[in-house]
Image (tube, rainbow, N blue to C red):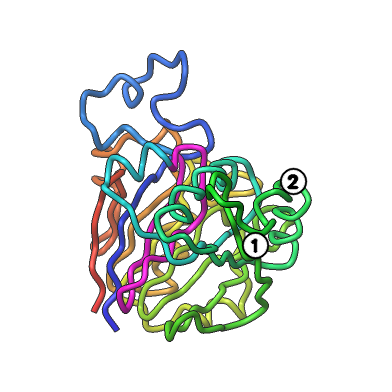
Amino acid sequence: MSVEVLILGCGSSAGTPAIGCPCPTCTSPDPRNRRTRASSVLRANGLNFLIDSGPDLRTQALREGLTQVDAVLYTHPHADHLNGIDDLRAFCYVNKAPLPIFGNDFMMQDVQNRFHYTTLPPGPWWDKPVLQPTPVVGPFCHRGVEIVPIPVLHGRWTIYGYRIGRVAYITDVSEIPEASFDLLQGLDLLLLDCLRNQPHHTHFGVEQSIAAAQRIGARHTVFIHMTHELEYHALNARLPHGMEVAYDGMRLISA
């Protein structure tokens, strides 16, 4: 199954440029150093699976001409991955249909608690998101596409990455459990968290990301969720063969 990937955003919670920062990355004229909050679309069998709905979702969708979202795969409920949830109403309005969303039970409960109005039945004007939260604990199918949640640690939280076909997306990870490495075998493409040079208590640093990518052994690894500490060209120059730095709007295809 071929999977197409569109990287909507590859930035960290502050985005790049960071407000008020004069560093070389933030002042770079290269558009590959301008990063909105982390989110991607995985397209398989004609369906668009959006991973997370960050606060830049509207801008990202307009920039890339994204008008179709068939389901949302949520990783965890931090603001930079969830708080663009209101912009999902546009996709509900276009289709005049509820939008399925998936994640672990903690994630789905957070949506219910903080954004309860998004789970109500549709009104006549489709002026609010109409979402259908479904907790998942293992592989599941949505309209014929198998999706494999990949449990990883984000500090003390267990959150999800996702695998579709030979593509996996893992953001905000500080540790990959042994059992999850087994779910990441045979990848053609891996999108992997790489926050900054030094490790963080809830994220991989550069050397951890490289080590994890080497162990997983995907044919092609692309690093995502980066702060302004990591300049596009400088980081690319440090990476082993088969690894590269993401940029907003990057498009990739896996066989």
Q: Secondary structure at mark 2?
A: helix
Give the CA separation, mark 1 to mark 2: 18 Å
Could you tell me which residue is drawn at 62 percent across and 41 percent down? 79
Q: Which residue is mark 1?
A: 159
Disc 2 crowd rating (10 Å Cα; few below 14, some 14-19, many 20+) is few
Q: With 248 as the anchor, is 104 left or right in this view?
A: right
Instruction: Look at label 1 and name its amino acid.
Output: Ile
Q: Which numbered circle lies on residue 151?
A: none
Is residue 38 highlighted in magenta?
yes
Location of residue 167 in the rendering, given as x and y in whole percent from the top left corner: 37, 73
| In front of the other: 156 or 55 | 55
Farthest residue in the front direction? 124
Residue 101 or 245: which is nearer the viewer? Answer: 101
Q: Amino acid at mark 2?
A: Arg
Verify whether residue 122 appears in magenta.
Answer: no
Q: Is residue 69 left or right of residue 117?
A: left
Q: Which contiguous range is marked in magenta?
A: 37-57
User: Eyeballing the image, is 248 above or below 5?
Assistant: above
Q: Residue at x 30, y 74 (%)?
A: 46
Q: Can the viewer see residue 206?
A: no
Q: Is residue 174 left or right of residue 2?
A: right
State the image coordinates of residue 236 (x, y, percent, origin top left). Answer: 26, 46
The residue labelled by disc 2 is 114
